[in-house]
Image: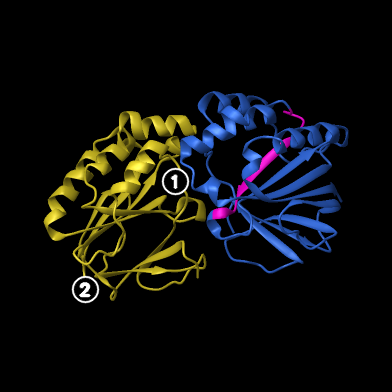
Chain colours: A blue, B yellow
Amino acid sequence: MNNTTFDFIGGKTGDWKVVKMTTLKGDSLPKVTHIDKIQSSLINRFEGIWSLKGIISNLRYTEKSDKEKLAAVQEDLGRPQATYAALIPIRKNEAWWNLAQDERRKIMENQSRHTHIGMQYLPAIARKLFHSRDIGEPFDFLTWFEFAPEDEAAFNELLSKLRQSEEWEYVDREIDIRMKRV
Amino acid sequence: MNNTTFDFIGGKTGDWKVVKMTTLKGDSLPKVTHIDKIQSSLINRFEGIWSLKGIISNLRYTEKSDKEKLAAVQEDLGRPQATYAALIPIRKNEAWWNLAQDERRKIMENQSRHTHIGMQYLPAIARKLFHSRDIGEPFDFLTWFEFAPEDEAAFNELLSKLRQSEEWEYVDREIDIRMKRV
């Protein structure tokens, strides 16, 4: 058990009730009615119908100016009014991972404006990134979002912009799971 | 068991006989006579006197031009003539990890010329980096080097240059373990 490793357990019980699961690319995940997000360890727990593990890590692409802008405006998970959530596991293809750091950064920011797009929806959409690739998980990243019901349209717009970006051409598996707090 | 996770087990047996262990900064590790480097999993094995776990990951700082230069000249581990090895576990302080990506890159390359220094000693010194920070290990990185006995002086020179760099001001724990193949 540590502070940086989390399990996202899909099953029949949990703090978040699944409203919709949409597979955008690649293999789907079995349908579940609930998801639990719990602090965990690197050991697999084999609970629920499926579970995905992710680790909070240091920033890999964000530069100083954006880091400061983000820190000034973004909000934490767990806000009382943020009763809607989304879990979006994604995997990128080998072509992406074979790129050098500057090539990936260029696609993410210069072409795709990933951080800039996300920033337009702050502080309404709270977001936390979990890394899964290095620990042998089926996805590379798990992103968890929380927002108030009235910000759902804005959240959909944010996703639509990202999915049209050059960066998303490298995504080969993506599932969009929408939830409401129980 | 996977292809990217390795355990470095210090104990009384192993493929590499320890010649010298030097603690340069921070807490030392208990003395051992041998080290084994084995493919492993994320589960702790609790073998030997101590064991360190590391994961091979994607490049985090290397840019395209350096990536291509490195690929053209660097050699793999396991060369028959490379009977000397070094395992150097290091940890960097919180100030380092709180820096943004561009700040860390600037210190590593513009000021410290980390890649440039390493490149001067290729192909003689083979090197492999293992990441440990994200999996809750006591060190952030484990670097494993292999070289022929006649290249030991060059290897010492390489380390001396890196340890004088600005990047190394952020290192708060470093142990230098030298070995010969059994």
Evaluate whether residue B99 shows in this view: no
Q: Which residues are magenta?
A: A121-133
Q: Nearer the viewer, residue B59 or A94?
A: A94
Q: Given the image, on which type of amino acid does mark 2 rest?
A: Val
Q: Position of residue A37 (x, y in %)?
A: 72, 54
Provide residue B71's location: percent of width, then percent of height.
Answer: 35, 48
Nearest the viewer among B143 and B169 is B143
**Closer to us: mark 1 or mark 2?**
1
Residue visible at 29% across and 55% down in the picture: B75
**Taking A55 as reference, is B67 left or right?**
left
Question: Where is B35 relative to A37, above or below?
Answer: below
Same chain for the residues at labels 1 and 2, yes or no?
yes
Q: Is residue A126 left or right of residue A167?
A: right
Residue A127 covered by magenta stretch: yes
Local packing at callout 1 (Cα closer than 10 Å; few below 14, some 14-19, many 20+) is some
Residue A115 vertical position relative to residue B86 in the rendered view, above or below: above
Q: Under tag 1, what secondary structure?
A: loop
Residue with the mark numbered 1: B59
Image side of residue A114 versus residue B50, left or right: right
- The Cα atoms of the two marked residues, 1 and 2, are separated by 31 Å
